[in-house]
Image: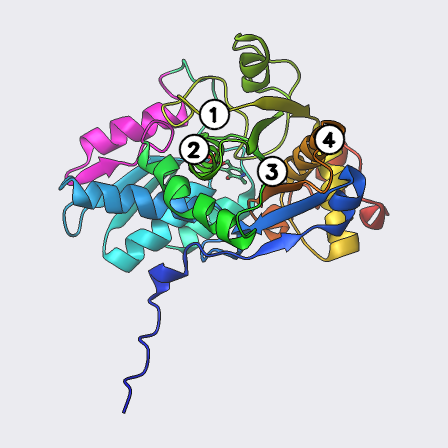
């Protein structure tokens, strides 16, 4: 008798996410726009992949020992991914987070058993910044490692090894463009490098929110920013180690209003409830699709990342008062 195939373990649920064709964005772009459903990861975001790769890399290098602690500074999603992977592998988690992030993420981290340290939001140059605070805590804690997602390239390796080949297979080796926004830059750099390995003609675009410095950097070599954004998890002011050498061919800058328009349309027209970084990514994918079509690549196939679920932002972008306080438009169906 044939032995039954072994069932996957919980950690095997990270990655291999579905890819969906997005009807409204495809129509708007005049070609095919696809979204990689990263909200389907066990921790609910694209960052589960980075968490798993960073932890496995630290184990392989002998830095992380049994029963050790992982310390990280994060806008939330990386912390959630780390906490789950750490629980599965018998490690402890300490997460440092700016105190202006969505309440849902803080509650989730506590619920998962992570020790949560909240700090006021500050500029990167300030020693109290959540990234520097997390590094110091790691240095002071016995048996701890600092995950260092911004400058630890095991982060982008996750996307070179898993996200890019998955996209390639799901689109049967025919992909014309890829775009997403950068937080650490692990996703855009890793998927970009991984896809270029397969086909150097795939056009890689950075989609930047307002208030971030990368649009200007890729457009004219200057790290400078204009405006601001309420999007969580994206918007970078420097070239992190993960971004270093990223094969960026072109760049778009997308406003929160435009991102929110896509969040609303994807929810009402396609039944996908997503966070704002996904809306900004989809707006970027539509811009990239139009550019490819204008360059004669009709019928182009463009992929982007649906980073996390809107359920993580009920108190922010799905809250009419919060939106009004930020001067942003309120979704029609939430107006009272
Ligand atoms: N969207 C959300 C909601 C995130 O939490 C993150 C992670 N910071 C990103 C996008 C960007 O991913 P990356 O860090 O790989 O650039």
| Residue annotated with mark 4 | 296
Q: Nearer the viewer, mark 3 or mark 2?
A: 3
Q: Nearer the viewer, residue 144 or 107?
A: 144
Q: Answer yes or no: do the residues labelled 4 and 1 have beta carbons within 8 Å?
A: no
Label 2: element kind:
helix
Which residue was labeled with disc 2? 193
N-term-proximal mark, 4 vs 2:
2
Element under disc 3: loop
Q: Which callout, 1 or 3, points at the residue further toward the start of the chain?
A: 3
Residue 128 in the image, given as x and y percentages of width and height: 38, 21
Tell me where residue 258 sits by quadrant: top right
Distance from the alpha carbon under mark 3 to that under mark 2: 14 Å
Task: Compare marks 2 and 1 and give the one earlier in the sequence.
Answer: 2
- The one of 47 and 165 positioned closer to us in this rendering: 165
Residue at the spot of label 1: 247
The percent position of residue 188, horizontal first and vertical second, equals 49, 33
Residue range highlighted in magenta: 127-152
Spatial CA span between label 4 and label 1: 22 Å
Residue at coordinates 63% horizontally, 37% vertically from top-left?
281
In percent of the image, x 32 and y 83: which residue is there?
4
Mark 2 closeness class: few <14, some 14–19, many ≥20 residues within 10 Å: many
Residue 135 in the image, given as x and y percentages of width and height: 28, 28
Query: Measured along the vertical axis of the image, is residue 143 above or below residue 16?
Result: above
- In the image, residue 116 lies in the stretch drawn in magenta: no
Q: Which mark is residue 176?
A: 3
Mark 1 to mark 3: distance in Å? 14 Å
**Residue 27 falls in which quadrant of the image?**
top right
Report which quarter residue 153 is drawn in. Answer: top left
Task: Please give left or right for residue 200 compared with residue 207 in the image.
Answer: left
| 37, 317: nearer the viewer | 37
Give whichever of discs 4 and 1 has the lower sequence position.
Answer: 1
Dot 1, crowdedness within 10 Å: few (<14), some or many (≥20)? many
């Amino acid at each position: 008798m044939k032995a039954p195939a072994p069932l996957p373990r919980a950690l095997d649920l990270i990655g291999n996410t579905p890819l969906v064709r997005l009807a409204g964005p495809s129509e708007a772009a005049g070609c095919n726009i696809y979204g990689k459903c990263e909200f389907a990861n066990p921790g609910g975001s694209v960052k589960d992949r980075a968490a798993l790769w960073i932890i496995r890399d630290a184990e392989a290098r002998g830095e992380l020992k049994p029963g050790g602690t992982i310390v990280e500074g994060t806008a939330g999603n990386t912390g959630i991914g780390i906490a789950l992977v750490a629980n599965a592998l018998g490690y402890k988690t300490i997460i440092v987070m700016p105190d202006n992030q969505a309440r849902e993420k803080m509650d989730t981290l506590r619920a998962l058993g992570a020790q949560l340290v909240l700090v006021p939001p500050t500029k990167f140059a300030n020693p109290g910044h959540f990234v520097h605070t997390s590094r110091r805590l790691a240095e002071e804690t016995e048996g701890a490692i600092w995950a260092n997602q911004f400058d630890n390239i095991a982060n982008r390796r996750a996307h070179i090894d898993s996200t890019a080949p998955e996209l390639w297979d799901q689109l049967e080796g025919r992909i014309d463009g890829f775009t997403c926004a950068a937080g650490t830059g692990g996703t855009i750099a890793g998927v970009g490098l991984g896809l270029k390995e397969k086909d150097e003609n795939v056009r890689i675009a950075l989609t930047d929110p307002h208030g971030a410095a990368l649009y200007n950097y890729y457009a004219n070599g200057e790290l400078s920013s204009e405006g601001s954004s309420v999007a969580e998890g994206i918007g970078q002011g420097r070239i992190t180690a993960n971004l270093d050498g990223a094969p960026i061919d072109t760049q778009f800058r997308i406003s929160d209003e435009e991102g929110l328009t896509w969040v609303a349309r994807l929810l009402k027209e396609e039944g996908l409830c997503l966070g704002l970084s996904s809306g900004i990514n989809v707006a970027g994918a539509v811009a990239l699709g139009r550019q490819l079509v204008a360059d004669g690549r009709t019928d182009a196939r463009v992929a982007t990342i649906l980073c996390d679920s809107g359920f993580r932002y009920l108190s922010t972008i799905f809250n009419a008062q919060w939106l009004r306080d930020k001067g942003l438009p309120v979704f029609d169906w939430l107006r009272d």
